[in-house]
Amino acid sequence: MSAENTPNVTTQEQPLVAHLIELRDRVLRMVIVVLAVFLVLFPFANDLYSAIAGPMRAALPEGSTMISTKPIDPFLIPFKLSLQLAVFGAVPFILYQFWAFVAPGLYRHEKRLVIPLLISSTLLFYLGMAFAYFVVFPLVFAFLAGTAPEGVEVATDMGSYLDFVMTLFFAFGIAFEVPIATIILVCMGVTTPEKLRHKRPYVIVGAFVAGMFLTPPDVISQTLLAFPMWILFELGLIFSKGFVKQHRHPVPATAGAEMSEYKEDSPDEMVGSDIDPAQEYIDPDRFVPLSDDEMEAELDEIEEEESGETGVSADSEDSHKTKLRQVQ
C-alpha cells in the first residue's frame, strides 16, 4: 500500500474517552471564540441592527418606521443579532476545528482536498449572505411594501424582521454551497458529471422546490434563490470534471502488446468460425468432427488407395491414420 492510500494515524489507536475529551476541548474553543466575537460586536449592536434594517426602511413609505411590540425587544433583538453575527463570523474557525478533529483519520490526498473545500465553502457562504443583502433584500422589501392594500400602514415589527432576515441569510448561504456538494459527490464516486448533466431538468425543478421551502412565501425570493442554485450547479459540473475517479482497471501494456502481436500473426483466426460465429476466437488445434459427406469422401479415398496402389509411403499412412482418428 502506497503512502497516498495510507491513513495518517498514530501507531496506537486512541480509546473512545480520549476522542470525547478532544471533541469537548474543540467545542469549548468554538464557544470561546464565538463569545469573544460577540463581546466585540455587542457594543455596536444598535448600529448593526440599523445596517441590517436599512433595506427594509428604504422600502417603507415616507413617514413609516419599524415598531417594537414588546418592551424588551429594543434590547433583546440587537443582542440576538450580535450573537447570530458572532456565530456567522466564527464559521471559519468552527469549520477548522471540525476538520482538525477528523484529520488524523484522513488519507493524505483527502487532506489536500479538504482544505481548499473548507476555504471555498466559507467564501461561498459569505457570498450567499452578501447576495441576499445587496440584491434580494431591496427587491423583496420593495415588492412586499408595494403590495399593501390601500389604507394599511406598513410598520414591521423589529423581531419579526430579524427572523425574516436571518432565514434568508441562512437559506442563501446554504444554497451557494451547491458547487461544493457537487464536487464532493463526484469525488466520492457517488455520481459523475455526465449523470448529473442528464438529470439537469430534475435539478432545476429541485432548485425551485428548495427555494419554496427555504425562503418566505413570495415569488421573488424563491426565484432569486432558484436561479443562483442552478447557475452554481452548472459551475459545480464544470469544476467537478477534474475530480472524476477512473473506476476502470486499465489493461497492462504487456497484455495489450501480446494481444496485438497475436492478432497480427493470426488475423483470420480471430474472426470466429462457421461452427460458432458469435465466438470471437477459435483455437486452431481444437478438434472439429467431419460431416457425413466428408466422412464418406475420406473412406472412398482410403479404399481407392488401398486397392489401386500397392506401395504407400509412410507419410500417406500417417495422414490416413490421422483422418481415421478424426472420423472415429
Image (cartoon, rainbow, N blue to C red):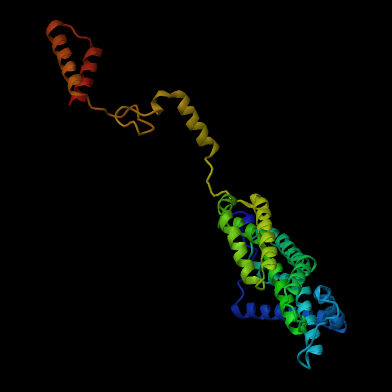
Q: Residue furthest bottom?
A: 71
Q: Is residue 287 left or right of residue 147?
A: left
Between residue 147 and residue 202, name the one nearer to us: 147
Q: Is residue 61 visible?
A: yes
Where, by quadrant of the figure, is residue 47 drawn? bottom right
What x and y, as percent, mark residue 297? 18, 16
Judged left or right of residue 278, residue 5 is right
Whether residue 280 sits left or right of residue 30 in the image: it is: left
Q: Residue at x 68, y 81 (%)?
A: 24
In the rendering, at what x and y percent does residue 70 appear?
76, 92
Q: Position of residue 106 (x, y in %)?
A: 64, 64
Residue, x 49% and y 32% (percent of image)?
A: 258
183 is higher (above) or lower (below) than 134: above
Is 62 above or below relative to 79?
above
**Along the viewing direction, whichever of 13 and 58 lies nearer the viewer:** 58
Above or below, comparing residue 114 to residue 195 in the picture: below
Q: Image quarter for residue 127? A: bottom right
Which is nearer the eye, 67 or 81? 67
